[in-house]
Image (cartoon, rainbow, N blue to C red):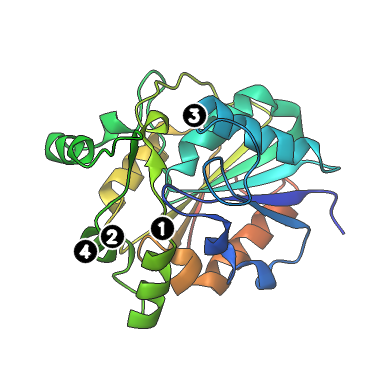
Amino acid sequence: MTSSFSLLVHGGMHGAWCWERVIPHLRHRTIAINLPGRPGAGKQPPTLDGFAEAIVDAINDEPGEAVIVAHSLAGIVALAAAERAPRKIKKIVFVAAVVPPSGSCFWDMLPAPLRWFGRFLLSGDKTTIMPRWMARAVFCNDLSREDQDRLLDSLVPEPVQILDTELRYKIPENVGVSYVLTTRDRAIKPRMQHEYVNSLPKRTRHFTVDSGHSAWYSRPTDLAEIINAEIEDDGSSSTARFIWV
């Protein structure tokens, strides 16, 4: 068995629960964490630094190198963690993930109307959560009604500080990079995902899943096979390719 392990990191308003259908299909040691602000999370503050430290603490508790699988907003967190623990991270697998240019933040990636709408939804405790009708439209377009309700009932408010903190980073040369593009995504449109892919290092490997944003619910076996392939990759395969599943 490979000495590497996967660390599954959920996106904004989600939790470790979102990987429940993927984990049974993985062939290696796997950890799914709750980022700060969720039940069962560590004591780190709900900030970008706190989120990154939660990842670093999790990978330092395990032997071997980590393959970080980062969904959606977790793309930002994985980039911050790679700066802190480059020797413990074998690879980052971005899944429909936000990859902003260095020196920007998540809010910068949104069109002006959505930035305003997000600010409008801020609560008194400086958190924000997407209205149920909107979350259904952008997260659930390829899910059954039962799965939609299960997902929507599990969403939690997201600390706004993670969304408007400027991130400066450079992906370490020793850290592999892959991006899984979701073709029917309404949260992070494929056009934007292509822009993220083009901004990543040339060594980036590309995969495509025919799904909406919540691929871990609608296409769990396909996503698991990509993760299995990436953790078992010995570096001898092509460094840049598209694989459609």
Residue that carries the numbered disc 3 in the rendered image: 47
Residue 211 seen from this side: no
Q: Residue at x 49, y 42 (%)?
A: 74
- State yes or no: discs 1 and 4 in contact (Cβ < 8 Å): no
Residue 107: image location, x then y, percent: 29, 32
Q: Residue at x 52, y 35 (%)?
A: 77
Mark toward the viewer: 1 or 2: 1
Residue 82 seen from this side: yes
In the image, residue 22 sits, relative to residue 233, either above or below, namely below
In the image, residue 56 sits, relative to residue 41, either above or below, namely above
Among the two numbered marks 3 and 4 on one chain, the one whose residue lies closer to the N terminus? 3
Mark 2 is on which residue type?
Ala
Which residue, as the protein is rendered here, is positioned at the far front?
124
Residue that carries the numbered disc 1 in the rendered image: 155
Circle 4: element type: helix
| Separation of residues labelled 1 and 4 (CA atoms) | 13 Å
- State yes or no: discs 2 and 3 in contact (Cβ < 8 Å): no
Circle 2: element type: helix
> Relative to the observer, which residue lies in front, 75 or 117?
117
Residue 12: image location, x then y, percent: 42, 47
Residue that carries the numbered disc 2 in the rendered image: 135
| Separation of residues labelled 3 and 4 (CA atoms) | 27 Å
Mark 3 is on which residue type?
Thr
Disc 1: CA contacts within 10 A as few (<14), some (14-19) or many (>=20): some
Q: Residue at x 73, y 57 (%)?
A: 30
- State yes or no: discs 4 and 2 in contact (Cβ < 8 Å): yes
Residue 24: image location, x then y, percent: 68, 72
Mark 4 is on which residue type?
Trp
